[in-house]
Amino acid sequence: LRRQIRNPRRARKLDCFECRATACCLRGGLSSEQFGSLREIARVHGPFQPGQAIFRIEDSFQSLFVVQAGSVKIQSVLHDGTHLVDGFFFSGDMMGLEAIGDRQYRHDAIALEPTWVCALPFEQLESLCSFMPRLQHRILALMGQKIRQTTDNIGHGRYMKAEERLLLFLVTLCRHEMMCRVSGQEGIYLPMTKGDIASYLGLRPESLSRALHKLQDKGIIRNDNKMIQILDVDAARKRICK
Amino acid sequence: LRRQIRNPRRARKLDCFECRATACCLRGGLSSEQFGSLREIARVHGPFQPGQAIFRIEDSFQSLFVVQAGSVKIQSVLHDGTHLVDGFFFSGDMMGLEAIGDRQYRHDAIALEPTWVCALPFEQLESLCSFMPRLQHRILALMGQKIRQTTDNIGHGRYMKAEERLLLFLVTLCRHEMMCRVSGQEGIYLPMTKGDIASYLGLRPESLSRALHKLQDKGIIRNDNKMIQILDVDAARKRICK
DNA sequence: CGATCAATTGAGTGTGTTCAATGTCAGTGG
DNA sequence: CCACTGACATTGAACACACTCAATTGATCG
């Protein structure tokens, strides 16, 4: 499959010790003994096939999930049945933070490629936190970061025009991929559909398509189907002022 | 002053025990002994006069703040110097959650009326959490709720037209006021300027003005300067589908 | 009372939407 | 192997909504 040739992610179950999600997941700052306790409550699930749900809105909230490999979109359903994409998650991203303090999840989490996740039962995690201040600190920090990202991306995006919003999205994605040391040079692979991206950006697919075209005409990006490359990083930065 | 006549909030320093913020603040679920420990680290600050800052972007993050009485807007500054209003806080609301895990605050917090806040030094709060699982649980729940609110209000608002966004804002505000048992019948007092509301909703002041006018023409709200009343609650609910 | 800032109103413009048609691609079955 | 299917993506033309700019009215406070 072309998708799997182009997508550099490997497709197999990972142990915590070889998991690429290190930087973003909870183990940062823990002693090896503490990390052991954390590892004991973690359970790897997968593979989830594209379109398959990791959790659904109606499910009762039990666990946080860290994406080990693959990618996930989260979406909510509007009164009229419309699906709204509220976010994308890649290796190392923590899912389910928004459900903490509630009984149910707030979204459907749908795999975009063959995907493995690491489940952390929340009650057990909470108990662990009481004994491990660093872990508690890490979760709180993670949630703070989540709030910041939400307001930055969605909130500030509101005041931008379509092209700038799109560029902000691409640059953010690119930075994330770079952080996880997945080839940033040859371009980014977009596992989701353009429709999903449009929904996330609050645009119609048609408008997104036109925005992509314009950015390509200006020489800022290269848009080859599901591969995107940012050619002129400086111009991009200027446009989104970051 | 007309503002103070119309605004039912009282203007004096409150002790924790008479603070109206009970329902929303951290003390929920704590034993009286535990509440005592929490109270020991809390410090009441105020009054802050309208326009005065409770904290600023450049300040290093030290404390969370609960609004005891009054109201606050938080805003960020764009590259070009534009101010973006990112939220409003009323009695019982917790401010600063978005700064957790970062060194600095992410916003300027500006009082909209004479305002008192209750400062909770975060390091001490974190220490307390290790001894008080319920407190830890409460903070985590509060942050989860914050994430939900952000995506619900800002995220879903993106797919709405100006009128609906405005209505969502008003209904949310109204519900909040009802929860805090401040007269919801005679209307809501809006301590912020229309410009602030417009900024928060991602609109120009002109567009907001027109949207208000239209909603009034349709008999859904009554708009008397800084007092707003939702006349047709059912129609409002239908428009925003909640 | 005049000064100042906030709020409203109007007219013209522009960006994104809507709707419909066409194009592309991967998978399927003849 | 090729035509067919269905989902996704693109393109075009007309329209709607919110923006821009400018002028006016209204509120608040010294």
Image (cartoon, coloured by chain):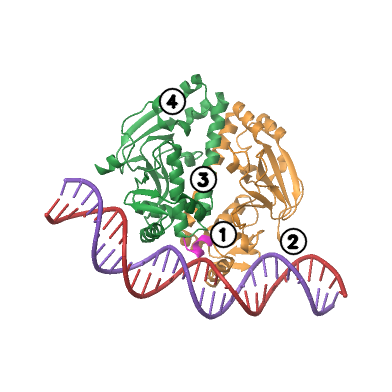
Chain colours: A orange, B green, C red, D purple
Q: At label 1, which amino acid type do we have?
A: Leu
Measured in 3D between alpha carbons, the distance from the residue under mark 2 to the one under mark 4, in whole angstroms, is 57 Å
Magenta highlight on residue B108: no
Query: With respect to residue B217, does B115 lie above or below?
Result: above
Q: What subunit carries mark 2?
A: A
Measured in 3D between alpha carbons, the distance from the residue under mark 3 to the one under mark 4, in whole angstroms, is 28 Å
The residue where tag 2 is placed is A5
Point 46% across, 49% down: residue: B233
Q: At label 3, which amino acid type do we have?
A: Gln
Q: What subunit carries mark 4?
A: B
Q: At label 2, which amino acid type do we have?
A: Ile
Q: At label 4, which amino acid type do we have?
A: Ile
Measured in 3D between alpha carbons, the distance from the residue under mark 1 to the one under mark 4, in whole angstroms, is 44 Å
Q: Of tags 2 and 1, which is closer to the observer? A: 1
Tag 2 near tag 1, CB within 8 Å: no
Point 43% across, 23% down: residue: B40
Residue B8, percent from left and from top = 33, 38
The residue where tag 4 is placed is B41
Q: Are marks 2 and 3 on the same chain?
A: no
Residue A136, percent from left and from top = 58, 32
Please, what secondary structure does the residue beneath circle 3 have?
helix
Tag 3 near tag 1, CB within 8 Å: no
Q: Is residue A185 visible?
A: no
The residue where tag 1 is placed is A170
Q: Which residues are magenta?
A: A159-166
Tag 2 near tag 4, CB within 8 Å: no
The residue where tag 3 is placed is B149
Residue C5, percent from left and from top = 26, 53
Per the picture, the main secondary structure of the magenta-coloured stretch is: helix
Measured in 3D between alpha carbons, the distance from the residue under mark 3 to the one under mark 1, in whole angstroms, is 25 Å
